[in-house]
Image (cartoon, rainbow, N blue to C red):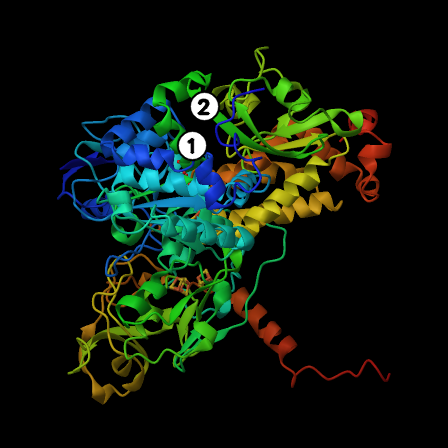
């Protein structure tokens, strides 16, 4: 059994309530932190090597140290609980079952940053968790962990939960800030970065739920202890939300550094493939990251074991690797249709683009339409090339990374599964029955592609 | 601060953007700007037409920037080196943006009032493809009225947000915004609430395409058939300095004066724009010269012109005579094919 940091108490009955949480050592990190120098807490987090769990993997301590303390403007901590990436549902689990851990983390982190007004921005679809959090915050206020002069330390903190309107783009940190200010959730152009000009033009740090929930353990133990868990620059534990064709989908906390093979096939975690069908592909970090084909999942391109770390999952760049992203682990067996899956992702990004910049606004729609045609047997040979060119033209030319996130899955699907796209285009009548890969496994019909001469 | 753009060095103040520095140099190192508007705050960054390659970040940090940067939003650093027309990548990005802007665009220039003074036409003329690769159905919207004098053709909008900033900054209200997301995002006065601010007409001038057009001028004339004159009147609401677009003795349209980047020099009020269409309302200063590159400039009468000689040959005229007979109903006997 790997060490648990976030989920160690999650199975205690009643842990959702303040009393049980407190009895089990909750809020100890706040007690300890209030006696510390705020900058020392930031130092601890830096030593821990904790990397942002929201997707980009930027070191949390480093981000905190960028916050502008000199200007004297009020500072804010905003927790990003907008979790809307297809395949990612780890924050939901954490907030639903152990809400006080996040609140404890918010208080400790706000203290480290010197923030007196902090927010949790939660997606609109998590309404029941919004209520859970509100209740937990009320309890924390009643117990004196929030409000004026917390536990006699002279430190004030107000914490609010804000409910989003259900837009994926509001997970992007600057769009989230706009939305929190009551405006349309359009990402801002950076620089200036939120650490200098964020919420109401004040210095702001935006962190993911899981990042913030890891802070109490680091403060209670030490950054050094945290850094001992995990492997290399991927320190600590990480939550993965597993979905797709495995025996035991769910949310798992793992020590970083175990192999992908162990994670997928051991009984402690995913328990192997459902119905023992063959594995076809894997998306290790949510819909935005490239899909890996079967031969690149357990081994990297140069034959090493693929590990559950930031570095190993990204090994080989996008040509033969992927990215840890937000930990949305999606497993596909041979019955999955890659074209349909790619279309579905494209549809999502088309729907969620904010429409501010031309390449993403127009390009996402274009890709979706082409993929829809291919999937429905109306594709042509040139479509694959056009698709490739469109995704290449979006990538890197947009304001925020949503454009890239829309381009990468399409690029990876074409890179690794081009023959499946060709099959869709050449045999539209076979595509129509929708179960073509069940009764006719792709391996068995693949030769048809070669026999057709152009 | 020293910045080098396509090999040309220029000294600029801190806080200048790359685009502004390029405009100081002038000529063809200036990247096209579809959304940035120097007269309005917070514009730019949306269209991505002005992307450039920064091949050297600054003297302090000489690393090149990995991504193409929007020149309108990128501040210069001392020692920065920028490539505009000498960068293959930047030109590719510009072509890509042009293609993206056109895929859902109706391209109905023949019936579009903006034709001839349209930035998108100019952009696609320079960077566009001859053929489209877009086979899908274009997205469409219903035309809408923004107040009683302005027509919005959302189909032609490129979502540059200029009019939104105008509504906010010049008309001092936020009742004109963007609805929906992605390629269904749409400019609208919320639930068609009319904008009746006295400066609202400036949205027509800032719009780079034919999305916002002047209803008092709609379909009256192609812009290049009008003769522009600088004129002014005493106005207590604005500067009163305008360009009159005349057809013979008739004032067909009044606009603000625009510079070589198609930006208005000074905003004008709706009264000057819509309500004074008599020559006697104005003091006419003289013909307006255009620095800007556009169809209107071709054969502009303020320029010295060569005499055009039409060399008609006899045969051609004979042919015309025959054609005339063919199409003329009177001279060709009417044959009823249905009843014979
Ligand atoms: C389109 C888009 C959506 C995002 N959605 C989320 C999200 O739902 N949750 C999240 O924590 N971060 C999301 N991010 C990442 C945030 O911008 C930001 O990097 C993150 O909240 C920083 O927290 P961290 O440093 O703790 O990872 C998103 C980014 C983009 C570009
Ligand atoms: S990349 Fe897409 S989501 Fe991001 S700002 Fe541009 S249009 Fe909006
Ligand atoms: S807006 Fe410009 S490109 Fe579009 S139809 Fe009008 S003139 Fe043509
Ligand atoms: S209507 Fe015109 S000015 Fe307004 S966003 Fe569209 S293109 Fe820009
Ligand atoms: S002018 Fe710079 S992005 Fe539009």
- Which residue is pictured at 19% across the width and 27% down the height? B60
Q: Position of residue B325 (x, y in %)?
A: 62, 78
**Relative side of A84 to A397, left or right:** right
Residue at mark 2: C-beta within 8 A of ligand 1: no
CA separation in Å, label 2 and label 1:
9 Å
Q: Position of residue A295 (x, y in %)?
A: 66, 19
**Relative side of B114 to A375, left or right:** left
Given contact means CB atoms under 8 Å apart, are the residues at marks 2 and 1 in contact? yes
What kind of element bears circle 2? loop
Q: Quadrant of the C terminus of chain A?
A: top right
Q: Please give the chain letter of the residue carrying mark 2.
A: A
Look at the picture and state if A374 lies above or below A230. below
The label on residue A25 is: none
- Which residue is pictured at 48% across the width and 28% down the height? A5
**Hey, which residue is sitting farthest top in the picture?**
A303
Q: Please give the chain letter of the residue carrying mark 1.
A: A
Report whether residue A368 is seen: yes
Look at the picture and state if A230 lies above or below A397. above
Look at the picture and state if A21 lies above or below B132. above
What residue would you read off at disc 1?
A: A214
Look at the picture and state if A450 lies above or below B133. above
> Of the residues under marks 2 and 1, which one precedes in the sequence?
1
What residue would you read off at disc 2?
A: A236
In this rendered view, identify the residue nearer to me: A229 or A444. Answer: A229
């Amino acid at each position: 059994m790997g060490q648990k940091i976030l989920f160690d108490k999650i199975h205690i009955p009643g842990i959702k309530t303040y009393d049980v949480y407190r009895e089990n050592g909750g809020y100890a990190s706040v007690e300890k932190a209030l006696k510390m120098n705020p900058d020392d807490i930031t130092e601890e987090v830096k030593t821990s090597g904790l990397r942002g769990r929201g997707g980009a993997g930027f070191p949390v301590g480093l981000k905190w140290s960028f916050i502008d303390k000199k200007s004297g403007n009020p500072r804010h901590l905003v927790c990003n609980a907008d979790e809307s990436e297809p395949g990612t549902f780890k924050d939901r689990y954490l907030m639903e079952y152990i809400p006080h851990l996040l609140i404890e983390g918010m208080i400790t982190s706000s203290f480290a940053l010197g923030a007196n007004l902090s927010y949790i921005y939660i997606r609109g679809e998590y309404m029941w968790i919004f209520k859970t959090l509100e209740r937990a915050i009320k309890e924390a206020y009643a117990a004196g962990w929030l409000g004026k002069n917390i536990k006699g330390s002279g430190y004030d903190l107000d914490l609010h939960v804000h409910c989003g309107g259900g837009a994926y783009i509001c997970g992007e940190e600057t769009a989230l800030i706009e939305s929190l200010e009551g405006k349309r959730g359009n990402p801002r152009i950076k620089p200036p970065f939120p650490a200098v000009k964020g919420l109401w033009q004040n210095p702001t740090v935006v962190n993911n739920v899981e990042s913030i929930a890891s802070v109490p353990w680091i403060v209670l133990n030490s950054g050094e202890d945290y850094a001992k868990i995990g492997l290399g620059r991927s320190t600590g534990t990480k939550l993965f939300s597993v979905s797709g064709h495995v025996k035991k989908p769910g949310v798992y906390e793992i020590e970083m550094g175990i192999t992908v093979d162990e994670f997928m096939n051991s009984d402690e975690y995913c328990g192997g493939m459902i119905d023992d069908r063959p594995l076809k592909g894997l998306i290790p970090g949510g819909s935005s990251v490239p899909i890996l084909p079967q031969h690149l999942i357990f081994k990297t391109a140069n034959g090493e074991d693929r590990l559950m770390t930031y570095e190993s999952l990204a090994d080989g760049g996008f040509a033969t690797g992927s990215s840890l992203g937000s930990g949305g682990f999606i497993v596909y067996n041979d019955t999955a249709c890659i074209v349909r899956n790619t279309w579905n992702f494209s549809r999502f990004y088309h729907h969620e683009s904010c429409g501010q910049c031309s390449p993403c606004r127009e390009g996402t729609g274009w890709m979706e339409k082409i993929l829809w045609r291919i999937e429905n047997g109306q594709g042509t040979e040139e479509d694959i090339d056009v698709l490739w060119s469109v995704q290449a033209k979006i990538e890197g030319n947009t304001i925020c990374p949503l454009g890239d996130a829309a381009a990468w899955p399409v690029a990876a699907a074409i890179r690794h599964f081009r023959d499946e796209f060709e099959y869709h285009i050449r045999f539209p009548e076979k595509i129509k029955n929708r179960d073509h890969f069940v009764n006719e496994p792709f391996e068995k019909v693949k030769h048809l592609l070669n026999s057709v001469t152009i | 601060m020293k910045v080098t753009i396509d090999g040309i060095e220029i000294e600029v103040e801190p806080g200048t953007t790359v685009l502004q520095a390029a405009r100081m140099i002038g000529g063809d190192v200036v990247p096209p700007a579809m959304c940035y508007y120097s007269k309005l705050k917070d514009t730019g960054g949306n269209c991505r037409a002005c992307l450039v390659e920064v091949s050297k970040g600054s003297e302090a940090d000489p690393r090149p920037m990995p991504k193409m940067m929007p020149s309108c939003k990128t501040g210069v650093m001392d020692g920065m080196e920028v490539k505009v027309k000498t960068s293959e990548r930047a030109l590719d990005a510009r072509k890509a943006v042009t293609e993206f802007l056109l895929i859902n665009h109706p391209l109905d220039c023949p019936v579009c009032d903006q034709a001839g003074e349209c930035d998108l036409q100019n952009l696609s003329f320079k960077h566009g493809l001859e053929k489209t690769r877009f086979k899908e159905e274009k997205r469409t919207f219903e035309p809408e009225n923004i107040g009683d004098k302005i027509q919005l053709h959302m189909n032609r909008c490129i979502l540059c947000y200029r009019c939104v900033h105008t509504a906010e900054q010049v008309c001092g209200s936020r009742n004109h915004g963007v609805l929906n997301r992605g390629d269904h995002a749409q400019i609208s006065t919320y639930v068609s609430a009319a904008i009746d601010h006295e400066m609202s007409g400036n949205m027509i001038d800032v719009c780079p395409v034919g999305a916002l057009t002047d209803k008092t001028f709609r379909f009256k004339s192609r812009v290049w058939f009008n003769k522009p004159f600088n004129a002014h009147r005493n106005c207590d609401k604005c500067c009163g300095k305008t360009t009159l677009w005349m057809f013979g003795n008739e004032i067909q349209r009044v606009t603000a004066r625009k510079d070589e980047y198609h930006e208005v020099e000074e905003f004008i009020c709706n009264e000057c724009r819509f309500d004074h269409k008599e020559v006697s309302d104005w003091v006419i200063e003289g013909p307006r010269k255009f620095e800007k590159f556009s169809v209107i400039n071709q054969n502009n009468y303020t320029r010295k012109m060569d005499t055009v000689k039409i060399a008609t040959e006899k045969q051609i005229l004979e042919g015309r005579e025959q054609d005339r007979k063919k199409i003329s109903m009177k001279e060709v006997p009417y044959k009823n094919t249905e009843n014979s």
